[in-house]
Amino acid sequence: MYCKRCGGSKLQRSRKRTGWEEFLGVAGFVPVRCTECLDRKLRFILFNQRIKAEIVSAKPPQ
C-alpha cells in the first residue's frame, strides 16, 4: 500500500473519528495516515487482514 498523494510507502492506521468511519469500519474500511505528507484516507482492507510490511506502527522499534 502506498500514499496516493506523495507516493510514500510508510502508512499507519489512524483512529476512527466519526460515527460514519465506525460504520465503514464494519464494511472493512480503515483510516490510514501517511507519515511523510500526513494525508489521511480510508482504505479497504479485506477481511480485516494485517498488512505487516506496509502499515507501520506509530511507535518505532527500540
Image (tube, rainbow, N blue to C red):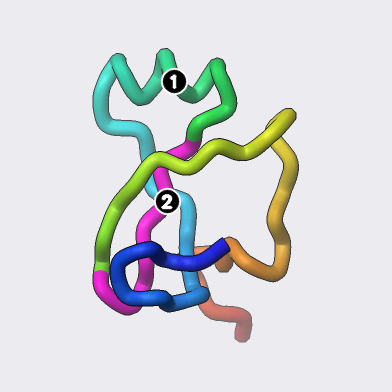
Q: Relative to 60, does residue 11 appear above or below in the rendering? A: above
Task: Tell whether position 54 is magenta.
Answer: no
Q: Which residue is mark 2?
A: 32
At 37% from the left and 66% from the top, the residue drawn is 34
Q: 51 or 1: which is nearer to us?
A: 1
The prevailing secondary structure element of the residues shown in magenta is: strand
* Element at label 1: helix
Q: Relative to 57, does residue 16 appear above or below in the rendering? A: above
Position in image of residue 36 (x %, y %): 32, 78
Position in image of residue 20 (x %, y %): 30, 17
Tell me the kind of residue under disc 2.
Answer: Val
Tell me the kind of residue under disc 1.
Answer: Leu
Please provide the residue range marked out in magenta: 30-37
Judged left or right of residue 38, residue 50 is: right
Q: Are marks 2 and 1 in contact (CB under 8 Å)?
A: no
* Element at label 2: strand
Q: Quadrant of the N terminus?
A: bottom right
> Which mark, residue 35?
none
Q: Quadrant of the C terminus?
A: bottom right
Q: 31 or 15: which is nearer to us?
A: 31
Would you call the spot at circle 2 few (<14 residues within 10 Å), some (14-19), or many (20 or more)?
many
At 51% from the left and 75% from the top, the residue drawn is 9
The answer to which image quadrant residue 18 occupies is top left
At 41% from the left and 76% from the top, the residue drawn is 7
Q: 59 or 36: which is nearer to us?
A: 36
Position in image of residue 22 (x %, y %): 40, 20
> Which mark, residue 24?
1
Distance from the alpha carbon under mark 2 to that under mark 1: 13 Å
Q: N-terminal of the two: label 2 or label 1? A: 1
The answer to which image quadrant residue 42 occupies is top left
